[in-house]
């Protein structure tokens, strides 16, 4: 191997110029280098002939924005580098690589459709279009997943309500807004790539021209003054090369190797003036040693993705900005730089192995979520509360599903389909339950409307006792009736409550008024009771009896007193009993006079229930007294041969006489009571 070719290989990465005969060997060595597949990051903006065609044929009109945009036909995300060199140079055409890698990603699958739209707007407004492809792709996938699930639920509901599938239409303003933003992104991206192609080709022409200038420099080398001038031109060419911009990737290695070959040739021709060459070699050596230090530091970096991205920049500087070094150092420094590179590369490979494990673990977790939802769907609830509980459980499981993270790519679609299937089954059962609930709720609505009509028809009824019972009964019936449609629930409840409250407010107002009146009556009766207690009889039976009856009438005319003060009636009767004893009235007369007062009080209260109860009581007493008399008379049969003056016989006759008097009193009371009906 020639010294020149050896130097060319060891000073830089294994890339050779077109003129270098060792190119095939180094390419073969490069092809044998193992490289990890990175489906998310590598070859992000490779502009090949196919991608140019995609740009030219991309759908840019929004005439049918109610349909979702088809996936891009290019497969940039799926392209993998064939060797380490390709991976390290993946950003050769992308000036926004640093920005692209610095834009933070969110858990887009956990965001709502509104928040996803907000994120897309933010990316389009604040970042370069070529730097946001990964973010937009993930946002779009999350939005489509949520929309399709929402659309599927709407379709199921439409069909369950008797709709025909051919008539189903689902419109979403959010989808229209999202499509509009995505079209904007596509337009910007297409415009960027069209301009990028022009710029890359223009830069290619510039670099080829610089190579031609570089070739001519060796013809200008002469004396010391000539060397100084030529070396200044050489430095100018290097500066213009560094600033020439990116070129198409498929030409990058070829052009760079060609350039580097002529750089080394120029230095070989500089042997006439070693001062220039050695000075430049030394400066380049210092720069490359610093790059090696930086690469070795990156090899210790825990964030392997960050280390790999920064390593790409170091390789670019090594190749683009720093020239050759003396041959004696070329192999040594390249081996050091290459060793640090391979450490980072191996760490990156290990990282992606672990990523695969994490994806497998995520798959297991998502399958557990799917199984949990499937179990719930297989045991549908039978009540509203039960469904509410299951809905909370399923919603929590859904949120967990979206938070778990990515799964292996080959399992992504089957996992998503299984997830949609079990959630669709759950929603189908839920919708079926609430469909039946709506039918039952409509029937309940009719029942409650009847109660509303009853309440409204009787709210002003003057038959207080009957209406109280009626209102209590319909309120009890209302509680027993189940739910009604939510849109009607509040309205009919307000009508029912208003009618009931109207009646009871009126009742309470009347009761309050009566209570005030009863309090006044109590004051009058207390004064009258004191008056009766203080009365002095004249000794004339007829006059005194007339006075007592007038007092009784005045007492009766005074009216009712509060229920809690009913004992005043007993006090009044006790006073009357004392007066009747002084008048020497018969028991029957006094009882009937007092009873007349009591019956009058019941009549004033307009209490038919009390009158009926009193009638039942008296009738029962009459029957009891008659039974006692019969029993006593039967007992006399045992004393047929006993003289009438026998004490025991005399006692029986006395009891019979007393019972007959009592019977006359009860019969008189019953007659008085009947006169009130």
Image (spheres, rainbow, N blue to C red):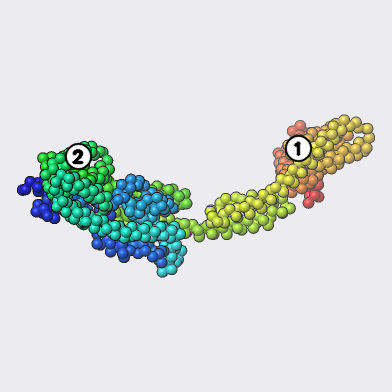
Q: Nearer the viewer, residue 461 or 208?
A: 208
Residue at the image point whose x is 90% and y is 31% from the top: 536
Q: List x then y, in percent, for residue 128.
A: 36, 52
Query: What residue does disc 1 label?
Result: 566
Residue 299, quarter of the rendered image: top left
Horizontal side of 210 relative to 504 (left or right) equals left
Indicate which disc, 1 or 2, sits on the residue closer to the N terminus: 2
Residue at the image point whose x is 78% and y is 35% from the top: 568
The correct choice, above or below, for 212 with respect to 281 in the image is: below
Residue 647, quarter of the rendered image: top right
Q: Do tag 1 and tag 2 residues touch (Cβ < 8 Å)?
A: no
Spatial separation of the CA atoms under disc 1 and disc 2:
121 Å
Residue at the image point whose x is 28% and y is 52% from the top: 94
Q: List x then y, in percent, for residue 534.
A: 87, 30
Query: What residue does disc 2 label?
Result: 283
Whether residue 54 is visible, yes or no, is yes
Q: Residue furthest left?
A: 1
Horizontal side of 451 relative to 325 (left or right) equals right
At mark 1, the secondary structure is loop
Label of residue 252 in the image: none
Of badges 1 and 2, nearer the viewer stands 2
At mark 2, the secondary structure is helix
């Amino acid at each position: 191997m020639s010294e020149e070719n050896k130097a060319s290989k060891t000073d830089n990465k294994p890339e050779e110029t077109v003129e270098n005969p060792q190119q095939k060997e180094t390419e073969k060595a490069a092809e044998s280098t193992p490289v990890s597949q990175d489906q998310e990051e590598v070859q992000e903006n490779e502009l090949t002939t196919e991608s140019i065609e995609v740009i030219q044929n991309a759908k840019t009109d929004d005439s049918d924005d109610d349909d979702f945009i088809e996936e891009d036909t290019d497969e940039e995300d799926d392209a993998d580098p064939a060797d380490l060199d390709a991976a390290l140079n993946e950003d050769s055409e992308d000036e926004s690589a640093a920005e692209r890698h610095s834009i933070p990603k969110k858990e887009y699958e956990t965001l709502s459709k509104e928040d996803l739209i907000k994120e897309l707007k933010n990316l389009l407004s604040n970042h370069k279009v070529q730097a946001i492809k990964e973010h937009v792709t993930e946002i779009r996938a999350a939005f489509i997943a949520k929309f399709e699930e929402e659309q599927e639920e709407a379709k199921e509901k439409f069909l369950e309500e008797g709709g025909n599938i051919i008539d189903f239409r689902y419109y979403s303003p959010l989808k229209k807004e999202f499509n509009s933003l995505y079209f904007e992104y596509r337009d910007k991206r297409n415009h960027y790539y069209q301009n990028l192609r022009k710029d890359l080709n223009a830069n290619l022409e510039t670099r080829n021209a610089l190579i031609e200038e570089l070739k001519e420099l060796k013809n200008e080398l002469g004396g010391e003054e000539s060397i100084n001038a030529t070396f200044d031109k050489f430095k100018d060419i290097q500066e213009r090369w560094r600033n020439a911009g990116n070129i198409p990737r498929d030409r990058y290695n070829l052009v760079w190797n060609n350039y580097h070959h002529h750089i080394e040739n120029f230095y070989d021709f500089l042997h006439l003036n070693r001062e220039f060459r050695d000075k430049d070699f030394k400066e380049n050596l210092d720069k490359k040693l610093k790059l090696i230090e930086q690469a070795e530091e990156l090899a210790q970096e825990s964030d392997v993705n960050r280390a790999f991205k920064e390593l790409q920049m170091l390789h670019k500087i090594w190749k683009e900005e720093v020239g050759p070094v003396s041959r004696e150092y070329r192999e040594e420094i390249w081996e050091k730089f290459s060793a640090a590179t391979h450490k980072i590369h191996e760490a990156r490979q290990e990282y992606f192995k672990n990523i695969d494990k994490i994806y497998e673990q995520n798959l297991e977790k998502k399958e557990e979520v799917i199984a949990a939802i499937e179990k719930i769907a297989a045991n549908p609830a039978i009540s509203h509360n039960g469904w509410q509980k299951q809905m909370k459980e399923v919603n929590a499981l859904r949120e967990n599903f979206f938070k778990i993270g990515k799964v292996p790519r080959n399992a992504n679609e089957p996992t998503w389909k299984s997830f949609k299937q079990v959630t669709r089954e759950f929603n189908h059962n839920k919708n079926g339950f609430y469909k039946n609930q709506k039918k039952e709720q409509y029937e309940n609505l009719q029942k409650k409307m009847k109660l509303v009509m009853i309440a409204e028809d009787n709210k002003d009824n003057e038959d207080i006792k009957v209406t109280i019972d009626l209102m209590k009964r319909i309120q009890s019936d209302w509680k027993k009736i189940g739910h009604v449609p939510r849109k009607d629930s509040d309205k009919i409840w307000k009508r029912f409550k208003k009618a009931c409250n109207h009646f009871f407010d009126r009742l309470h107002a009347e009761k309050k008024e009566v209570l005030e009146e009863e309090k006044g009556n109590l004051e009058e009766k207390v004064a009258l009771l004191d008056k009766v207690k203080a009365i002095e009889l004249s000794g004339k039976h007829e006059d005194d009896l007339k006075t007592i009856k007038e007092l009784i009438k005045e007492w009766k005319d005074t009216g009712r007193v509060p229920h809690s003060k009913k004992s005043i009636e007993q006090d009044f009767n006790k006073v009357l009993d004392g007066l009747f004893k002084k008048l020497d009235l018969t028991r029957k007369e006094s009882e009937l006079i007092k009873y007349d007062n009591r019956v009058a009080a019941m009549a004033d209260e307009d209490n038919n229930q009390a009158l009926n109860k009193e009638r039942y009581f008296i009738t029962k007493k009459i029957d009891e007294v008659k039974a006692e008399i019969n029993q006593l008379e039967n007992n006399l049969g045992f004393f047929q041969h006993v003289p009438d003056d026998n004490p025991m016989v005399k006692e029986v006759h006395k009891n019979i006489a007393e019972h007959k008097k009592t019977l006359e009193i009860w019969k008189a009371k019953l007659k008085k009571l009947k006169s009130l009906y």
